[in-house]
Image: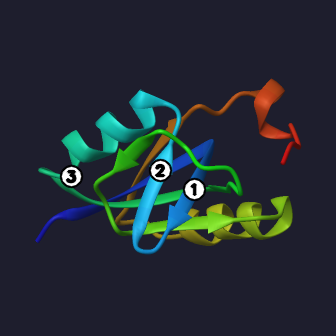
Amino acid sequence: MKKTLYVISNEKIFKSSDNFFCDNIDMRSTPEGLSKYFEIKIISRKSKISRSQKINLKSIKNFSNIISYLFEVVKNCKNKNSKFLLISLSPYTFFLLDS
């Protein structure tokens, strides 16, 4: 059984049907590559704008407000058997609010 790897990102991800899209190629390629070794679960921000890079993973949680996003991160940090990877997270972009 694979261990769970939570990818926590400030990247905005757009959902269309059952497909997910982002602009950052690193946000797409890193989790897809690591999916060979881990069960990947992505926690990200929700986008209303269509993005260009299709993410070939299905376990993605998008959050539209900062409170629910932070609550999900804190809730999953309590799981001792999981690992965490932060992508595109910095103090400058973390609290940036745009549509």
Please give the name of the residue rendered at 12% of the width and 50% of the height, measured from the top-left corner. Answer: 36
In primary-sequence order, the first of circles 1 and 3 is 1
Please give the name of the residue rendered at 45% of the width and 74% of the height, measured from the top-left corner. Answer: 17
Q: Which residue is mark 2?
A: 21
**Which quadrant is home to the N terminus?**
bottom left
Question: Is 81 displayed left or right of 85 in the figure?
Answer: left
Depicted 9 relative to depicted 70: above or below: above
In primary-sequence order, the first of circles 2 and 3 is 2
In primary-sequence order, the first of circles 2 and 1 is 1
Residue flagged by tag 2: what amino acid is it?
Answer: Phe
Q: Which residue is mark 3?
A: 35
**CA separation in Å, label 1 and label 3:** 20 Å
Secondary structure under tag 2 reads strand
Instruction: Tell me the colour scheme of the image.
Output: rainbow
Secondary structure under tag 1 reads strand
**CA separation in Å, label 2 and label 1:** 5 Å
Residue 95 placement: quadrant: top right
Residue 67, how many percent across, how many down? 84, 65
Residue 92, how many percent across, how many down? 82, 25
Residue 46 placement: quadrant: bottom right
Q: Which residue is mark 1?
A: 14
Marks 2 and 1: CB-CB under 8 Å? Answer: yes
Residue flagged by tag 3: what amino acid is it?
Answer: Ser
Depicted 75 relative to depicted 73: above or below: below
Please give the name of the residue rendered at 78% of the width and 31% of the height, measured from the top-left corner. Answer: 93
Residue 40, how many percent across, how many down? 32, 59
Q: Nearer the viewer, mark 2 or mark 3?
A: 2
Residue flagged by tag 1: what amino acid is it?
Answer: Phe
